[in-house]
Image (cartoon, grey):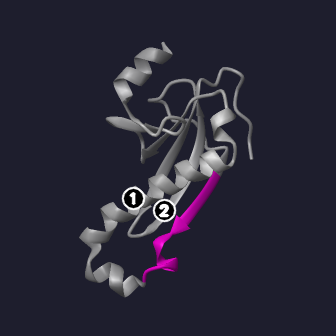
């Protein structure tokens, strides 16, 4: 695991993956639009609870449901690990942030443009 630079303004938890297998990279950021190298990674799979056959039979139904539950799981893990006491803002995004990110402290979605403006 690496360590963030002393100028780190936020941590961006970027979710990657598809078809039920997801991973999260933790990226210390100075700006939200210039993704730095990950300092930690972890992941999860819905196939612990759902067979690949069930997934393939109804991919559309499960894809959004799985993403939503995965977001909730990451936020719960963040809180359980003491994230509420962490002073640096932390956000969750599916792939690189485009429009919105999920604030891990407040569980609210924020506009990327608004967030970037607040960092400048």
Seen at 42% across and 85% down, the residue is 51
**Residue 66 lies within the magenta run:** no
- Using residue 36 as the reference point, say whether residue 111 is left or right of it: left
Seen at 69% across and 42% down, the residue is 82
Give the CA distance from mark 2 to mark 1: 9 Å
Instruction: Read off the residue under disc 2.
Output: 22
Residue 69: image quadrant is bottom left
**Residue 49 lies within the magenta run:** yes
Residues at discs 2 and 1 in contact (Cβ within 8 Å): yes
Which disc number belongs to residue 58? Answer: none
Figure check: 77 above or below 57: above
Q: Position of residue 8 (x, y in %)?
A: 64, 25
The magenta region covers: 41-50
Helix, strand or loop at disc 2? strand
Seen at 35% across and 24% down, the residue is 113
Name, please, the residue furthest toward the top: 120
Figure check: 119 above or below 63: above
- Using residue 27 as the reference point, say whether residue 66 is left or right of it: left
Nearer to the camera, 39 or 13:
13
Q: Nearer the viewer, mark 2 or mark 1?
A: 1
Seen at 63% across and 36% down, the residue is 84
10 Å neighbourhood of mark 1: few (<14), some, or many (≥20)?
some
Instruction: Read off the residue under disc 1.
Output: 67
Q: Position of residue 37 (x, y in %)?
A: 60, 40
Nearer to the camera, 87 or 25:
87
Point out the tag, 2 or 1, that comes first from the N-terminus.
2
């Amino acid at each position: 695991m690496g360590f963030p630079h002393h100028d780190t303004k936020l941590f961006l938890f970027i979710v990657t993956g598809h078809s039920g297998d997801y991973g999260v990279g933790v990226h210390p950021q100075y700006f939200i639009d210039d993704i730095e190298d990950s300092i930690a990674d972890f992941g999860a799979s819905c196939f612990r609870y759902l067979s690949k056959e069930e997934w393939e039979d109804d991919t559309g139904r499960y894809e959004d449901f799985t993403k939503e539950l995965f977001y909730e799981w990451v936020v719960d893990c963040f809180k359980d690990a003491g994230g509420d006491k962490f002073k640096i803002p932390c956000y969750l995004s599916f792939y690189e942030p485009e429009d919105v990110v999920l604030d891990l402290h407040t569980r609210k979605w924020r506009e990327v443009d608004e967030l970037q403006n607040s960092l400048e």
